[in-house]
Amino acid sequence: MGVLENKFNDNIVVGSLDKFLSWSRSTSPWFFQFGLACCAIEMMATAAARHDLERIGMMPRSSPRQADVMIVAGTVTMKMALRVKKLYEQMANPKYVISMGSCATSGGPYWQHGYHVLKGVDLVVPVDVYVPGCPPRPEALIEGLLKLQQLISDERPLTRKLA
Amino acid sequence: MNRSEIQSLIEEKFPNSLIVNENLQGNQIEIDGQFWKDIATFLKNDPKLLFDQLECITGIDTGDDGPLQSRYNLHSMELRHKIEVIISLDRDNPSVESIEQIWRIGDWFERETYDMFGIVYEGHRDLRRILCPDDWEGWPLRKDYELQETYHGIMVPKVKEEEGWE
């Protein structure tokens, strides 16, 4: 911070508000607690004591109004697709989506003959991070979440982007 | 009580209700659909039969222009015998009397068979789809099922290579 450095008392940190905002967002992305299939079991394991998501600032919220991240964990049926879309629309900005497992990403084992399965959740909501696996282990989901944190901390919410 | 004894009891009570079919196996019997509700009441309440448990209702599409079938697996807890009742239905207008008020579990079983095969259970008090969305088109487990292309604007069969999806 060049000229401003060491001009204040010891307990004052000078920095860019832009970076501060994205830092605070990236270190507390609360995720929306809902599961659709077996991936949800792994998601629960990830949030539970052994893998303990709260150490990277994530905690499950039961309402879309309070959540920043939606983890689509499992097979999205056509019936559920409309509801997933509605839940996504109910979340407040900024919002992020993680597609967890091969069903949510591409339809997985239902790709060819599953008449009832949505072939990828990116057909209804924009996805930020795809986590492969069937289902992904908690380590894989954590890597996806860290990638998402990286993505968020690279954002500059106050900087107007010049085309 | 084995199949032939059960058959003769039904034949005695409801003449001409049984359909002779050489391909039946084990404990299967085929009956005429128009007697079904009376026969079901009889099967449940007759002291020699006492089929108090409806285990399953299955729909079967026999393919090509063959009939649809509605099959009922019955079991008697009391007397420990089993029977499978087969009813063949017209493909263009499949309907059969509902036994939902005889065995209450039949409620959801019939809704499921209706959902998958479009078999209409006459007299069912709440015949809606149970698994597919209410506004889904077609009957998925029929052999001539054609998948609809879009559902509320969402593409259903995503063909990545051919249709220009990226």
Image: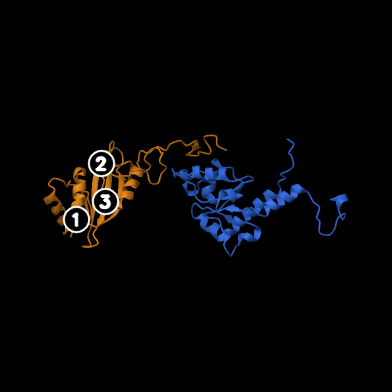
Q: Secondary structure at mark 2?
A: strand
Residue drawn at point x = 84 percent, y = 50 percent: A1
**Dot 2 crowding, Cα within 10 Å, few <14, some 14–19, many 20+:** some
Q: Which quarter of the rendered picture does the C terminus of chain B lie within?
A: top right
| Residue B165 x %, y % | 55, 37
**Dot 1 crowding, Cα within 10 Å, few <14, some 14–19, many 20+:** some
Color used for chain A? Answer: blue
In space, the residues marked 2 and 1 are separated at their CA atoms by 26 Å
Q: Which quarter of the rendered picture does the N terminus of chain B lie within?
A: bottom left
Looking at the picture, do discs 2 and 3 lie on one chain? yes
Q: Which residue position holds label 3? A: B72
Residue A43 visible in the current orientation: yes
In this picture, residue A95 sits left or right of residue B56: right
Which chain is rendered orange in the image?
Answer: B
Three-letter amino acid code of the residue under disc 3? Tyr
Residue under mark 2: which chain is it in?
B
| Residue B45 x %, y % | 19, 55
Three-letter amino acid code of the residue under disc 1? Asn
**Dot 3 crowding, Cα within 10 Å, few <14, some 14–19, many 20+:** many
Looking at the picture, do discs 3 and 1 lie on one chain? yes
Q: Which residue position holds label 1? A: B45
Earlier-in-chain disc, 2 versus 1 = 1
| Residue B147 x %, y % | 42, 38
Q: Nearer the viewer, mark 3 or mark 1?
A: 1
- Name the mark on residue B89: 2
Residue drawn at point x = 75 percent, y = 47 percent: A18
